[in-house]
Amino acid sequence: MVELSVCAPGDNYSAQQGSFEGPEKLLEIWFSPSPNRLHDHQNLSSSESSEAEDDHSTSSSMDDKELVERFSPPRSHRHGSTTIRHSGLRVVPRPVWDDVLSIVKCTVLNVIHNEDVDAYLLSESSMFVYPHKLILKTCGTTTLLLALPRLLEIAKQYCDFEKVWRVFYSRKAFMFPERQTGPHRSWQNEVDFLDKYFDNGSAYQIGKVAADHWYLYLTKPADDVLHHPKPRSHPYHLQGAMREREIMSGCSTPITSDTEDPSPFGNAGHSYPDQTVEILMTRLNPEKMKKFYHDATQIESGTVGGQWVDKETGIGRLYPEAHIDSFLFEPCGYSSNGLSHDRYFTIHVTPEPDCSYASFETNIPVEDSHAGDGEISPIEALVHQVVDIFGPETFTVTFFTSHHKEYHSHSHMVRSMSSMQGYQRTDRILYEFDGYDLVYGHYTKDDSA
């Protein structure tokens, strides 16, 4: 039996436990390559595909009727009465997500929506719900993976999703691993836990063992990667799913795979590939961190304080057209979600000097948002802008991109992680996955600069 959180809405469980673990756990579950392919991929009938909640906006109220319905499948609707906002995972009522998050040990601060995605700002990071996929990111001593069986159950109960197309799980090395609980006590425990639910999973440690490093677990794209009780006919972890090339300074970049057939993953209907950029920063500049502390004489906490931080720090200028939902915690700390059409960005900051950490993540294509004047690559332009806000002593960049007929170039990806002004690059590694490329870069402050 999972022990549920006793936190009230808006409380920070990890802070109550005295743990300020900034690095997040990040889980992505894809039930289909895209919203438009859900019907065919999940083998939904016409009647099933037209089912949704009568009124999505009423799901946040907790009257007696909903207390009964919160654990029941959604009711049928008249054909044509639904929109994409009410399809797939987005039909799941808010109280059901609250129950899931209680297993994780975090709570919802606020929610923003658009026609494509629901963005939940949490007491410990964020959750993004699309019709066809869910992204859950939590920091501190949260128990994210313990919610996995419930997530799969909800997808089946509310959406008739019986198959999983692809799974990603990743995290940076913890600052205080001894404070983690459940399957998060070690990377091997996490891998073993995931392997109970998914087939064809591969696990990797990326970066130097004695320094900052990053962990990744992923499955191959397949009709169904859910584990069904039967003997496995493949090795424990398929190393053939990935080829690793470490690019040392001064070496030529590999280009042998630039002409491979692009993957359909995430590209249907998009001018740019499916991308995810993470910038994970530690030992932040103390002077820059002052703006992430709540000063009651200057500004109130919560969303008003979050908006003040956006303006004062330059966070609001990262994506000027995005809809931003920000929150300033007491006595310190900051979180925000931003939406731009069907894409998002999210930022989380722990400013305390003994464990300072900030994370930035986005799937907004860098070619679209930071093309610039061509002097530096779009990914470098984005990294420069983000790093300047926080002034870290060290930071890691992970740049995922799906294969795309116009933007699939290994040489371009590796060159894009070449140098950052004021920093020395200590690692640059290219990984090739099924349908995806990943460039990993690690940087430390250049004291001579």
Image (cartoon, rainbow, N blue to C red):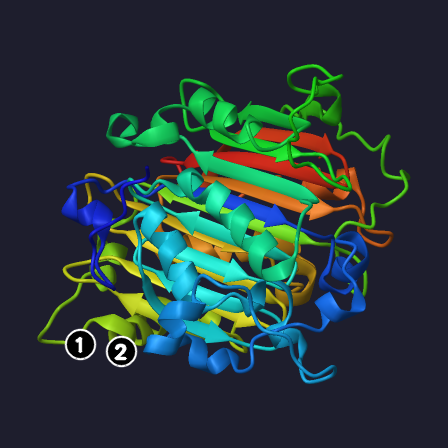
For label 2, the SS is: helix
Using residue 10 as the reference point, say whether residue 82 is left or right of it.
Answer: right
Q: Residue at x 42, y 28 (%)?
A: 212
For label 1, the SS is: loop
Q: Nearer the viewer, residue 90 or 389?
A: 90
Q: Nearer the viewer, residue 409 or 106?
A: 106
Q: Residue at x 70, y 17 (%)?
A: 231
Looking at the figure, which quarter contains the C terminus?
top left
**Cβ–Cβ below 8 Å for labels 1 and 2?**
yes
Q: Which residue has dot 1 on it?
A: 299
Above-or-below relation of 309 to 225: below
The three-letter amino acid code for the residue at tag 2 is Val
Above-or-below relation of 428 to 221: above
The three-letter amino acid code for the residue at tag 1 is Ile
Q: Residue at x 81, y 65 (%)?
A: 269
Residue 64 visible in the snapshot? yes
- Graded by Cα atoms within 10 Å as few (under 14), some (14 to 19) or many (20 or more), the crowding at tag 2 reads few
Rendering coords of residue 288 (x, y %):
27, 57
- The mark closer to the camera, 1 or 2, is 2
Above-or-below relation of 402 to 447: below
Q: Nearer the viewer, residue 419 or 2?
A: 2
Above-or-below relation of 395 to 122: above
Q: Say the numbered circle drawn on residue 304.
A: 2
Give the tally of numbered discs. 2
Q: Say the numbered circle drawn on residue 410.
A: none
Alpha carbon distance from label 1 to label 2 = 8 Å
Rendering coords of residue 131 (x, y %):
63, 64
Residue 419 visible in the snapshot? no
